[in-house]
Amino acid sequence: MFQAMGVHGPTLSPLASLLLDVVLLGCAFWLLAKPTKRPIFDSLFMLSLVLSVSLLRVVMQPIPNVQPVTVAALLVGAQLGARRGAAFAVLVAMISNIFIGDGWWTVFQAAGWASIAIAGSRLSLVTSTGFNLGRACMASLVAAFWFDFIVSFSILDGTIGFTEFIVYLGHGLPFDFLHMVGNLTFVIWMGGWFTQLLEEESSIEEIKFAVVNSHGIDG
Amino acid sequence: MLRRLIALLFVTLLLVPPIAAQENPTTWNETNSLSWEYDFEAGYISTSPLFDGERILVRTSGQSEPAVTAFDVSGNKIWQHTNNASTNNDMSPLLYVQAGQGQCGSWPEMVLVGWTSGLVEALNSSNGDVLWSTQSEVLGWGVTGQFALDGEFVLVPTRQGIGQYCLADGQQQWWTQTGLGWRNGVTVGETGYFLGDESGQLWHVDRTGIATPHALELGKIRHAPLLTDAGILIHGQADSGSTLAIFNPVNATLLQQIPAGHSPAIPLLRGDYVVTGDSSAIRILQCSSLCVVVDEIPFHTNGEIGWFDDGQILAPSNTLESNWGLFTFDGQENLTYSPIDVGLHGYGTAAPLQFSVGTTTFTVFGNDQGVVRAYSNLGEEQTVPADDFDWGVQGLIFVMFVLLGSSSAFLLSGKREWFLRTSSMLLLILMLLIIPDLSSQWSKAFDKQFPETSSSEEWNEQWPDAWLGTQIVIFELNGEEHSIGGLVGHDDVLSLTQSACEKLDFDLTGESTEFGWYVDSIDGIGGEGWEFSIDGSKGIISADHSDVTTTSIVRWTPV
């Protein structure tokens, strides 16, 4: 699904690109600002996380369809919640694409990773007993396929029919499989460490629990 | 127990490379060394070089170098004969003729050359002088097929027919119209001559020039028919694939049909055995009362195949980053394959030339980059160890061995997490190594199963009629369309585009990526990239992996 050498999707004018970036950035800030007012340390932590993963994506770009961001989005969603996970995904897509190549496809990449982050927040990948490696592996495999599927929609520009789209998807299956293997490797090698790193941050659920608890005591 | 079995499997895998190495201690590259190289710097070498006993004759073609050039065995250029009127890919093989005499007169040792300009020339092989020449008809293209000798005559397959000419003076005895031909080589039989055409007709022409067609409906016939004991073997080329067929000329019936891959190569006959090739495989058939496929090996070859006295078969792989394949037939039922690196990469359709001088065997290669490389066989006692040790590759292999061994050890010691880590890393490296070939093969297989059916690129009435039935490329540059047609013989978009750019004098730049060839700029225009369509359907994989038919119209548009 990711083997697009002849297809680029619709071409955006500079104004359309600007609007697209503003919308994406707005989404990211809205997602970050909405839940609660975070201390400056949290913001710096999120910023460094976004920059590190973006850099990793840029560095690994020559390797075909090995996408560290997919696993990172999954685990950030699992540890920091759906909102911050989605914001993380949007920002990483935007920042890394400044170096790799920006365009119509950025929207689909952001949407793909954001949806994976949201899924990560719902899959109980991290429980009270720790990081669930088996579940994370399964989730990363599905996430690879899902992300490639979402990004494939970026080629639809009105000139490609349903059959051609299916053929396009079929051609990319080896690269989908590579994405899966890459994800699996990232989860096995880095999953535990990455979730521990994110554990320093209190999850939204913990914050809510603490707030409710304190109100209960007060009451 | 299961864990130990898996570990045993891993350890067994560790032993595979040493075993494989022991089985094949002497490779072609170890017993052959580069003698010389000559770079024409332009033009294609689309047909096999020729050895006349003293000189190596190489034909080049294309707009910049339509010539026959002679070298001595040391690679020194002796003479060159050019024909600037021949601007297309010349692929009619050179034919060496020994001195002789007949009713038309006598002739010296010479080389016969057929040009796409329709010209047929007899050259003195010692100095390149033209002994005689004659003009045949041109319809977009002229001569592209293989000549045949019949006593004091040469049979020339022209664009729309076949002619018989005296070897002594080139005097035409007769010419008979057949069908539109392309690489329409001639075969001499007891009752006359056989050749095919683009509409799939097999023609029998008797020695007085009376022609009889047989409509086989197997697709285009682009080779000299092979006269086997089982019947006449034809490898017909259709858009959906190809068919190996055995035809009985006596009762005009098709005896056998064997499906094969796309874009067939020119088949060869030796005794009871036939070698065929196409975009999917090299096959060897035994033809006695029936033709039976004895063995086949996946390979991509679309032009000439070399089959030499020592039984070895050498074929160019007609792909962008390819080299040559060496096939050895054991004379019974096994065909073995090993790739050989002759330092010439890229598209190629010309068979190598092999000849011996004294005890030294020379093998001469040429390809679409216009480079000739001559190798000489050192003999086993002179074999030198390879000094091109690739640290990167060796390092990667070492890492893979370490990962494989570690996986076994961690599995046996019950360290599940570390087993998963090492084995997943090993799997990832393996996938990265095989993904270019895997995706290429997958795409081809996928296209075969789900062929494109839509066609919306219209014929432009302003285009010349000579472009009808050929491949056409359109470039959209700065709002203007630049079209070039009359292109033939290309199997993929990249090859076709390269040829079109050469004819239009456009610079084509690009880079090879893991996804395939990525076009950076055409005629200096890069922008945000280029995309193409084939017959109106948008290209969805890279240009070098996108197949074209014989009449495809490719359109390049800047993003």
Image (spheres, helix red, strand yellow):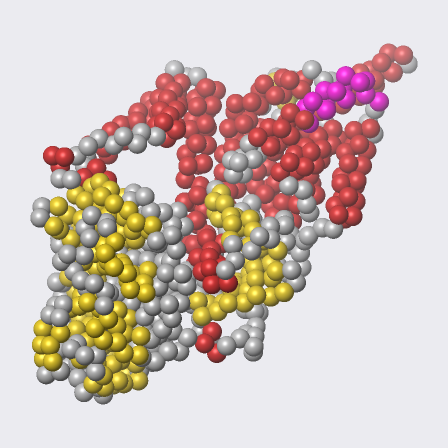
Q: Which residue is drawn at 71% across and 30% down?
A: A88
Query: In front here: B15 or A203?
Result: B15
Q: Which residue is drawn at 60% across and 45% down?
A: A149
* Chief secondary structure of the magenta portion: helix
Q: Position of residue A23 (x, y in %)?
A: 79, 41
Query: In front here: B180 or B85?
Result: B85
Judged left or right of residue B256, residue A177 is: right
Q: Where is residue B190 in the image (x, y as percent from the top left)?
A: 13, 78
Query: In front here: B313 or B243?
Result: B313
Judged left or right of residue A128, residue B295 is: left
Judged left or right of residue B510, residue B256 is: left
Q: Does the magenta stretch include residue A49?
A: yes
Highlighted magenta segment, given as a residue range: A37-50
Is residue B254 at least partly visible in the picture? no
A104 above or below B156?
above
Q: Where is residue A77 in the image (x, y as percent from the top left)?
A: 68, 29
Q: Residue at x 13, y 70 (%)?
A: B108
Q: Does the magenta stretch include residue B311?
A: no
